[in-house]
Amino acid sequence: MKKLIINGGKRLTGEVVIGGAKNAAVAILPAAILADEGICEIDNLPEIEDINCIENIMKTLGAKIIRETPKSVIVDPRNVKSYCANDDEAKEMRGSYYLLGVLLAKFGKAEVVFPGGCAIGVRPIDQHIKGFEAMGAEISVEHGIIKAYTKGGLKGANIYLDVVSVGATINIMIAATKAKGVTIIENAAKEPHIVDVANFLNSMGANIKGAGTDVIKVTGVEHLKGCYYSVIPDQIEAGTYMIAAAATKGDVVVKNVIPTHLESVTAKLTEMGVDVEEGEDSVRVACNKKLKGISLKTLPYPGFPTDLQQPMTVLLSIADGRSMVTESIWESRFKHVDELKRMGANIKVEGKVAIIDGNKNLTGAKVTATDLRAGAAMVIAGLVAEGTTTITNVYRIDRGYEKIEEKLRGLGADIRRVVD
């Protein structure tokens, strides 16, 4: 079992380079299967376990994956003949559901194992299914496998999402690229990685307009071709290092970012008293004073991202005064609170609200990463805690953060990985 051992109290300083966006890459990679001719070269991929997982699933479908560098691959989809992704790897990750949209668009049918991922609350795919059914698919779930079939392929439709869903927006958008006619997605999510997936599909020859707004219009095309594409930087990884810099009273330049994607994080850090300076493709985060508590509510983009709520909770636990964090996206995203309490944090959870009484010095303890972003929170807690922190379930962190201990050591952290 892999563990991270952190000796806290080190101030983070220097520069860190952010990798490609996980939430874009796990959709862009399988979407490359849609190319009817040519190959796709995809660059700036994050070096994380979820990418390795999706590549392995694609290989079982017949795709040829050639890794040119640790961050770039060539996808040759010419031998993809299977529409069934029902192996154990597909079960392990949430993003495997994008194969439903991809395979429906390519073959008019798909069989995909029910997706897994982090246990952060009920994560239904009803909006995905609603969209596919509106486009003419018949959906059933048998023995844990989602089966989708069409008669003559998908057809364009008007689809109103009952809730703002990133996954459903992307999945329906992917499926609609080769549907007959026009598909309009209303109440669509607006996250940067939705725009990135749309830009990738348009580079292949798709006709998608409105990505990044709440109405997306997709005019189906008959053929898609290979292309070269570079994935955008990961706003969540960037935000995590910004919070870590503030928590350790550090001075860190976070490079290879799109500052506008980080405005909600910048705003909250500034409100707490952190100095944030934006560059063209970087942000500098510096902090040399005691921070103050704030109120925070997670919201769909451009609001404060739910994926940074857990790391932010750590920062608020060492700030002066009382803070209130409202989690409006996932109902079970406070599982990390019990782990933080082991380290001395004073946090009380009441339903969707965490009440944090700050100004506490955290102390090292043995804790676990209950999910991906909770793992990042425990790393930040370990960095600021007095003494040694041991984090288990590190595989959850590896799903979404590339070389986390290497990057942190480059900033001066005392962190190492051990294997029992």
Image (spheres, grey):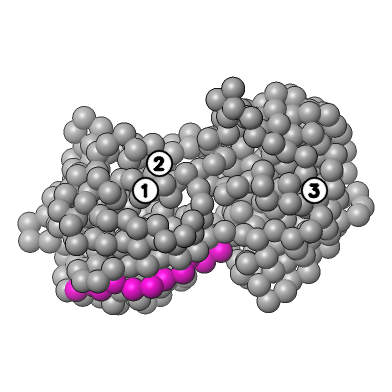
The reply, left or right, for residue 178 in relation to residue 297 is: left
Q: Position of residue 75 (x, y in %)?
A: 31, 61
Labels 1 & 2 near each other (Cβ < 8 A) = yes
The reply, left or right, for residue 283 in relation to residue 373 is: right
Instruction: Name the element at disc 1.
Output: helix
Instruction: Check disc 2 and report the residue beneath it.
Output: 93
Instruction: Check disc 3 and report the residue beneath it.
Output: 412
Q: Earlier in the sequence, mark 3 or mark 2?
A: 2
> How far is the residue under mark 1 from the one under mark 2?
8 Å
Q: Is residue 411 visible?
A: yes
Image quadrant assignment for residue 386: top right
Residue 224 lies in magenta, yes or no?
yes
Instruction: Name the element at disc 2.
Output: loop
Which amino acid does the dot numbered 3 rest on? Gly
Instruction: Check disc 1 and report the residue beneath it.
Output: 54
Check the image and report above or below for 150 versus 417.
below
